[in-house]
Amino acid sequence: MHTESSPSAAATTTAPAPAYTGAGLELKDLTLAYGDVEVVRDISLRVDPGTTTCIIGPSGSGKSTLLRGINRLHEPKSGDVILDGASTLGKHPDQLRRKIGMVFQHFNLFPDHTALENVALSPWKVKRLPKKTAFELARARLAEVGLRERADHKPRDLSGGQQQRVAIARALAMEPQVMLFDEATSALDPELVNGVLNLMASLSGRGMTMVVVTHEMGFARRAANQVVFMDEGQIVETGTPEDIFDRPQSTRLQRFLSEVL
Ligand SMILES: Nc1ncnc2c1ncn2[C@@H]1O[C@H](COP(=O)(O)OP(=O)(O)O)[C@@H](O)[C@H]1O
Ligand SMILES: [Mg+2]
């Protein structure tokens, strides 16, 4: 049976926590479409360096498409994505994805590789670090997410929560300036959710710039600097967690919160 480490066990396997220097991110009038159908329209948003923005909203409101547009898994129709003060739309998507890490609902690990290999592969093959350096880096990243002792396990021998932490370590191994999370805990068994949320909160507290699409309103309340409510492809409200959860202005947000809280 897979269980998450108890807090005391995690403490013995978690390496000293490094600080991050997340970059600022700005979306300017970003529009994304599937064919002729615009599913994200004119989104403008500022994410200050080292802060966490949580995006909430009903299913189908364009949250995933927006995240995919930020790192160009989906090519924007118009608008711009400014990273660390510079437009990214002229950049090759591969270059951009080294700077913007993404973690998905389904962990997308390579099933035939160990946890360590999953984390080391991109630094080794994409960043072209020497193999030894890439594997040392991967070990450090795994330790950082509390998985030092699981380095040689294949994904099938890890719990969902552990697999997601490997996926987070894999993204961190590229030393991104921004991390995007798309419902990173939605596929997890309930008892595994908190371990991953705690790790995300810890990254957030250590200076990573994060944009987090989540259904976990408790997480948004405690970890977000700003919360964005999206509906029908647009931002309806933006504010602090207190603004959004305690003083929702629009009837759409009030209705959404009454359904999810
Ligand atoms: N590959 C696709 N082709 C066409 N339409 C899509 C595709 N993916 C998503 N959509 C549509 O785009 C809209 C936004 O979807 P999505 O970004 O996944 O929303 P969310 O993540 O908020 O649930 C929805 O209406 C969805 O049906
Ligand atoms: Mg989605």
Image: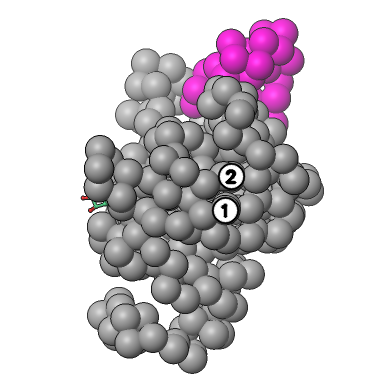
**Res 82 quadrant in image:** top right
| Distance in Å between CA atoms under marks 1 and 2 | 6 Å
Mark 1 residue type: Lys
Q: Is residue 154 left or right of residue 252?
A: right
Q: Would you place residue 86 above or below residue 64 in this image?
A: above
Dot 1 and dot 2 residues touching (CB under 8 Å): yes
Q: Quadrant of the N terminus?
A: top left
Q: Is residue 176 left or right of residue 5?
A: right
For the residue labelled by badge 2, is the local secondary structure a helix, a strand or a loop?
strand
The residue located at (39%, 56%) in the rendering is 41
Q: Would you place residue 6 above or below residue 57 in this image?
A: above
The answer to whether residue 127 is magenta is: yes
What secondary structure do most residues of the magenta stretch adopt? Answer: helix
In the drawing, what numbered circle is on residue 28? 1
Taking the image as drawn, is residue 73 in sight? Answer: yes
In the drawing, what numbered circle is on residue 81? 2
Please state the horizontal and vertical placement of residue 49, each as a whole percent of the image: 73, 55
**Res 119 quadrant in image:** top right
Viewer-side residue, 108 vs 44: 44
Viewer-side residue, 163 vs 46: 46
Magenta residue span: 115-143
The residue located at (28%, 84%) in the rendering is 255
Please state the horizontal and vertical placement of residue 17, each as a whole percent of the image: 74, 48
The answer to whether residue 152 is magenta is: no
Mark 2 Cβ and ligand 1 under 8 Å apart:
no
Q: Is residue 217 left or right of residue 70?
A: left
Q: Would you place residue 141 above or below residue 240 in this image?
A: above
